Amino acid sequence: MVGYKVKDISLAEKGDLMIEWASMHMPVLRQIRGRFGEERPLEGLRVGACLHVTKETAVLVETLMAGGAEVFLCGSNPLSTQDEVAAALAERGVGVYAWRGETTEEYYWCIDRVIDGVPVVTLDDGADLVSTLHSKRTEALGEVKGGTEETTTGVIRLRAMARDGALRYPIIAVNDAYTKYLFDNRYGTGQSTIDGILRATSILLAGKNFVVCGYGWCGRGIALRARGMGANVIVTEVDPLRALEAVMDGFRVMPLREAAEVGDLFVTATGDINVIRGEHMERMKDGAILANSGHFNVEISLPDLEALSVSKRLIRPNLEEYRLKDGRRLYLLAEGRLVNLAAAEGHPSEVMDMSFANQALCVEYLAKHPRMEPKVYRVPEEIDRFVARLKLRGMGVEIDELTEEQREYLSSWKKGT
């Protein structure tokens, strides 16, 4: 009997309904699950996953189990677990260890329980599972044949491990799949970040000066959606190419120290540490709102905010007021954690359909290729394109195919004008 620890197992019935709703909007995973159920390509495979425990993740877990895998799951953020979903998965035989509101100690205790399941393949979102295996639980490394990574922050960490020669098994960077970062990061993060901000604050975005820190794919999506809501979007960047792109996309670009003086709402989406610091907070107007959409709660310097403040209070769920020494008030959303999951429900199911389809197919790929070198790999192009085709099919969209003449023309250098 597989063990579990969740907040309240009696929530399982509600979780079942949430999973059913997500599955209805994830046609790609449903198609993959159908094939997995027939072929059982993951028979006997132990999968250890550290992912946001949401209704969409549950559909991925069901897909892996349909393929024959035994799954152990913990949350990849202390505030992102949907307790109803965790309960429903526990009742379905998943070794799930997750509940909303974990302490740091409890968070890593849950990761340890997943490692106790002796995974052969790991699925990670932020690389905390992988880093724990490589530091505190090295005795379990020998069983692991490969893994996947879901998000930008995790891929950055894993590539650093690979450069240092510390990575002991191969990782496929699902985040870098075209059908992941173009859609999940841009459309998913864009919509869910706005959703989290509005649930936490109930403010009007139209007319606000909305500062987006970072113009990667997540930042692009946030800026695009904020502009669509009528906000005046300002972008801050350190990369000249991304800054130039933001300018050409029609956004105002300026240093954060200047944006700090005019911004009404600030969102970080960089994957880096201390993006918004005390020097910026000191310039902000009374009532400015701070939110983070990066994976870890390090992008807004919480120590600086605490040092500048004389008091704080919770105004409403996920909205804390910090009163500064000069009387100004700054408002922090979701404790500085990723606002789209801590204050909302994460990406829409339709977007996670593609991300988790890549995850499922990459687990199958790792099961079939157990002797890959220990480095970070891109998702195989054939998987990326296959997911795109399945998504189009699920949306009822057909596209053209090249004629034989066109294929020949594209493969030849002899035919010109």
Image (tube, rainbow, N blue to C red):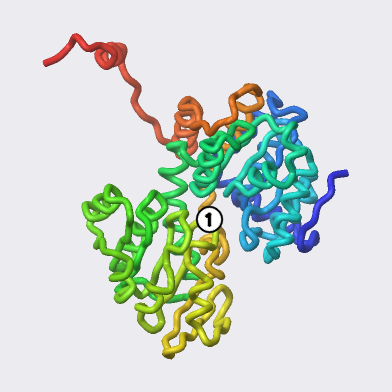
Q: Is residue 392 left or right of residue 165?
A: left
Judge by depth and name the residue closer to the eye, 172 or 23: 172
Task: Give above or below for 262 relative to 193.
Answer: below
Q: Quadrant of residue 283?
A: bottom left
Q: Is residue 164 left or right of residue 225?
A: right
Q: Quadrant of residue 399?
A: top left
Q: Quadrant of the C terminus?
A: top left
Judge by depth and name the residue closer to the eye, 99 or 373: 373
Task: Give above or below for 243 relative to 268.
Answer: above
Task: Give above or below for 159 relative to 300.
Answer: above
Percent of width and height locating residue 57: 63, 47
**SS under mark 1:** loop
Q: Quadrant of the N terminus?
A: top right
How many neighbours does mark 1 have within 10 angstroms: few (below 14), some (14-19), or many (20 or more)? many
Question: Is residue 352 among what the camera can see?
Answer: no
Judge by depth and name the residue closer to the eye, 331 or 141: 141
Residue hosting label 1: 295
Q: Is residue 98 left or right of residue 177?
A: right
**Residue at image coords 53%, 67%:** 336
Q: Residue furthest left?
A: 417
Query: Residue type at mark 1?
Result: His
Q: Quadrant of residue 227?
A: bottom left
**Residue at image coords 71%, 55%:** 108
